Amino acid sequence: MGTRNTVRDLETLYREETPITMATCYDYTFARLADEAGLDAVLIGDSLGNVIQGRETTLPVTLDEIIYHTRPVVRGSDSVHVIADMPFMSYQADPAEGVRNAGRMLKEGGAQAVKIEGGRREAETIERMVGAGIPVVGHLGLTPQSVHKFGGYSVQGRESETRDEMIEDARALEDAGIYALVLEMVPAPLATEISEEVDVPTIGIGAGDQTDGQVLVLYDLLGLDTRFEPKFLKRYAHLEETVTDALRRYCEEVRNGDFPRDEHAFE
Ligand code: KIV
């Protein structure tokens, strides 16, 4: 094996109580930068349906599209741990189909692991994937593939019933063999309780500061779309402004003859 972070490296961070850093990533160039910045893990998230494809939901994203985006991420990086998201309907209908599709993420995409949304209902599928040698990350809370069931993108686990169910789900996923658990838009006290309950790292997005790591959508943390302003988001750059400003100046200079100059021309 090379120097790429493995599931064992993430476990070591967890045991040492070092927060795990993760962001989504969808291409070669950003994978190279994620590596250089020292992220522990990247996720080829089905959020690519939103930020790359401009879709309303993640539901139309296909397995082939995730594989397509996973390959350049692997090519662009040497160290970061690479997790590929299982898209809607690639595992829900049948555990055997789920295992085969997860296998494609590793065989064809080069991912080291897959992430799947859902709780107890997916436990059998996860157990089979892990049995086949495929490391699995769970995902509870706001699971965007269930947007139509939830009736929108809201915080999950606020009522005592859904709260108890989420704890049960987390236990079932741990028993099924997940090596990490994403908690999305979960009240901080519940995320803390789940983090204490399970012996695998929890990676939060809108789940407070007591999870064992954090994940954000790359384009959101870079400030590439200021129309999207969820409470949990912190922008570490303002690239929407930077990019539009650069493109505006480029247009201006081409139009007024300031670019290209002699130094940009071949003899
Ligand atoms: O698809 C995605 O980007 C995700 C993260 C938000 C965890 O699932």
Image (cartoon, helix red, strand yellow):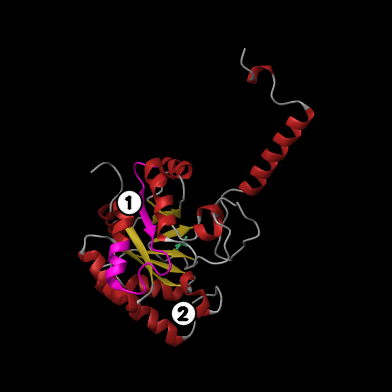
Most foreground residue, 135 or 62 = 62
Q: Report which residue position mark 1 lands on.
A: 108
Crowdedness near tag 1: few (<14), some (14–19) or many (≥20) residues, C-alpha within 10 Å:
few
Q: Report which residue position mark 2 lands on.
A: 157
| Residue in view at x 60 percent, y 51 percent | 224
Q: Quadrant of the N terminus?
A: top left
Which x, y percent locates residue 209? 45, 64
Query: Are the residues at dot 1 and dot 2 in contact (C-beta closer than 8 Å)?
Result: no
| Residue in view at x 47 percent, y 67 percent | 208
Which x, y percent locates residue 197? 32, 74
Which x, y percent locates residue 212? 37, 62
Residue 83 lies in the magenta-colored region:
yes
Residue type pointed to by label 2: Gly
Q: Quadrant of the C terminus?
A: top right
185 sits left or right of 42 in the view: right
| Residue in view at x 38 percent, y 75 percent | 193
Question: Is 211 placed above or below 235 here?
Answer: below
Which x, y percent locates residue 235? 58, 54
Residue 21 lies in the magenta-colored region:
no
Residue type pointed to by label 1: Glu
Instruction: State the image quarter where residue 56 is shown.
Output: bottom right
Residue 227: assigned label:
none
Q: Is residue 21 visible?
A: no
State yes or no: Cβ of the residue under disc 1 lies below 8 Å from any atom of ligand 1.
no
Question: Is 255 placed above or below 238 here?
Answer: above
Most foreground residue, 23 or 106 = 106
Region of the chain picked out in magenta, as a range: 77-101
Question: Is 31 placed above or below 55 here?
Answer: above
Q: Is residue 105 visible?
A: yes
Crowdedness near tag 2: few (<14), some (14–19) or many (≥20) residues, C-alpha within 10 Å:
many
